[in-house]
Image (spheres, helix red, strand yellow):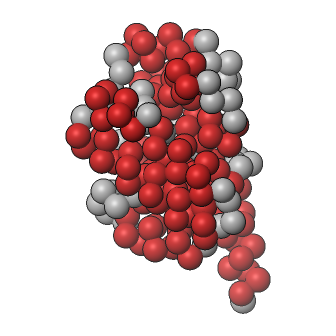
Amino acid sequence: MTEYLRQNLSEKRFRHSLNVSEAAKRLAEINGADADKAYLSGLLHDICKEMPAEEQTALMKRSGFEISDVEWGAKKTHHAVAGARFVFEKYGISDPDILSPIRWHTVGRGGMSIYEKIIFMADLISADRTYPGAEEIRSVTYEDLDRGLYEAFKWMICENVAKKRLIPKSTFDAYNEYTAKELKRTSDEV
C-alpha cells in the first residue's frame, strides 16, 4: 500500500499521508483506539486525491455512501468518498473502522466514531499543516479530542464562509454537536 501511494501521489501528498498516519496512531494511543487501524486509515485517507476527476466520480457512484448535493458540487472533497470505495475494491478492506474515516475525513459529520474523529483531526493537525491556528488546534487535540473537534469545526465553518463555499449539512451537524459539548464543558467549569 505504501508503495502504491509512493507511485501514485506527489511527494508532498505522500509525505502528508505518512504524517497523517503518524498523527492518527498517536491520537489512537491517547484515546484508547486501535493504533494499527488508525494508522492504516490515516495512511490511505488521500489515496484518490490525485486521481483523475472522472475516476473519482465513477468510484463515488458505486460507493454505496449517501452523498449530499453540496458534496457532489465540491470536487475537492470527492477523493474522500472515492478513496473509501477504492480501498475496498483494491485491497478488499471492508472494516468500517478504516473505510468510514476515509469517507468522512473532509467534511465530518455528527455522531462520528472514534476512528472518524481521529482521522478527521489527524488530517488537520499533521506535522505538515501550517495554516493560521494549526498549532493551537494541534495542541488542544492532543489534550482533548472533542475540544479539538470543536476548534476544528469552528475554524472550518469560518474558512468556508470567508471563501464563499457551500457547507454540507453533515459539517454543520458536527459543528453543532461539538459546540454543544464545549458549551456544556465551559458551563460545568463555572
Residue appearing at x 36%, y 21% in the figure? 51
| Residue 188 sits in quarter | bottom right
Q: Is residue 120 above or below residue 8?
A: below
| Residue 85 sits in quarter | top right
Residue appearing at x 53%, y 59% in the figure? 25
| Residue 107 sits in quarter | top right
Residue closer to the observer: 180 or 64: 64
Q: Position of residue 90 (x, y in %)?
A: 52, 21
Is residue 25 left or right of 128 when viewed as pictured? right
Q: Position of residue 35 (x, y in %)?
A: 60, 57
Task: Name, please, the residue furthest toward the left.
Answer: 11
Is residue 61 left or right of 124 when viewed as pictured? right
Specify whether residue 69 is in view: no
Task: Identify the image quadrant of the N terminus.
Answer: top left
Q: Position of residue 184 (x, y in %)?
A: 75, 73
Residue closer to the observer: 151 or 52: 52
Q: Is residue 135 above or below residue 11?
A: below
Specify whether residue 115 is in view: yes
Q: Position of residue 20 (x, y in %)?
A: 43, 52
Residue appearing at x 47%, y 26% in the figure? 78
Residue appearing at x 54%, y 43% in the figure? 41
